[in-house]
Amino acid sequence: MLQQFLRRVHFRDPTGEEVYFKENGEMSSVYHVKNQIFLSNGTNIEKHVAIIDLSAPEGKQLNIRQRLITWKYNTKEVPYSRCSKDCLSGYRRVLQRGKHTCCFDCVPCSEGEISNKIDKDSCQKCPDDQWPNEKKDKCVKKPTEFLSYDRDPVALVLCIISVTLSVITLVILVIFILYRDTPIVRANNRNLSFVLLVSIILSFLCVFLFLGRPVDITCMLRQTAFGVIFSVAVSSLLAKTIMVCIAFKATKPGSKWRKYIGVKIPNYVVFICSFIQVVICICWLSISPPYQEMNTHSYPGKIIIQCNEGSVVAFYAVLGYMGFLAAVSFVVAFLARKLPDSFNEAKFITFSMLIFCNVWISFIPAYMSVSGKNTAIVEIFAILASSFGILGCLFFPKCYIILLRPDMNSKKHLLRLEC
């Protein structure tokens, strides 16, 4: 009965809007929102501040005139319903102890985390290959770091040094080839000198395997190549030292050592000593070869592209064997240093091996105390320093005699020194 009477209700209010009930008992679709303001003198004022029109298109059903609204304390600012303001992106909420849940502090996200929404209770960790931006509201790609030719002045300097020393060694090799029949070149097996000079050139050039962006193939070649090349160089020095001792013993009347003078023994020494290093490198590459590694943990905010040595035992086996050859060569050269000067290169070999051993003994703790591209820089420095030590101690004095003191480059002068 009541619904029948309500359906008949139909009139206009003071604003001119029609008021009636629909079939299901709903009122008309337009509502007026008023703002009541209570003044200190006890009076109140009503302001018409909004209209709700349910028949309007979605998104336009509510029309608020914000400038007409007056809040408590006669202010136009919207009152805040919490005792703490919203935490912006890049921050997280931390509740204040002993207070209501609406009271909290805004704490910046921890290192490696972001918050991309307002009022988040926790931050989100970025993937391993990404890092937060300055506002900590977005994860961005981490920059990569390696010994780059175009970004690192150190790489360019090392490149120039390597090329310069390679050219100097090549010039010395050409000088020795041109003066191969002179006594100073022939005195201690010129073929070994040629092999040694070529291996020094290759050792300088193998520096380029350590420069640029590492990939699997360069990671495998850089350690094995330098290990084999240095083994050839050090075994050549060992063969030279052995030949100094044999040559001295062969000068004595009726000596049985005369039959050992020739190219066979030095060739055997170089081949056998180098072959052992080749076998070690082949086993290394077969079992656990070096490979490219993306190091995302050593330095926050960047990716270190480096070479993982694979088998650490194999890496130090290569260094250990090279050190063993250097130690043997040093000991033999040191014991033979007082032999006659006409045959004797042992003094120069002793000095070169002393430099070589000192460089590589210092290399191991330095290599273990650095990471990233600094490991490559340390190893490059060790390669350049040890190679230059051999080159300077062994060949610079001979080049001085060949080019500037040709009067000393004679058999007569050598025999006079022997006497």
Image (cartoon, rainbow, N blue to C red):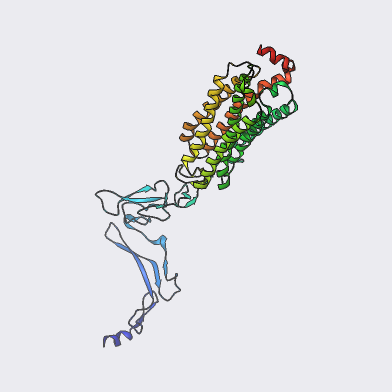
Write the residue at 64% across / 25% down. Answer: 259
- Please, is residue 122 above or below residue 182 in the view? below
- Please, is residue 18 above or below residue 60 in the view? below
Name the foreground residue: 371 vs 52. 371
Q: Residue furthest left?
A: 98
Tally the numbered discs: 0
Q: Position of residue 150 (x, y in %)?
A: 61, 41
Quarter of the N terminus within the rendering: bottom left
Q: Position of residue 353 (x, y in %)?
A: 56, 25
Q: Position of residue 389 (x, y in %)?
A: 59, 26
Name the foreground residue: 131 vs 373. 373
Name the foreground residue: 74 vs 242. 242
Write the residue at 63% across / 24% down. Answer: 394
Left of 53 or right of it: where is 333? right
Quarter of the C terminus within the rendering: top right
Left of 5 or right of it: where is 370? right
Quarter of the figure with residue 244:
top right
Quarter of the figure with residue 45:
bottom left
Name the foreground residue: 65 vs 345. 345
Residue 151 appears in the figure: no
Q: Residue furthest front?
A: 254
Residue 342 appears in the figure: yes
Left of 89 or right of it: where is 193? right
Q: Position of residue 195 (x, y in %)?
A: 65, 32
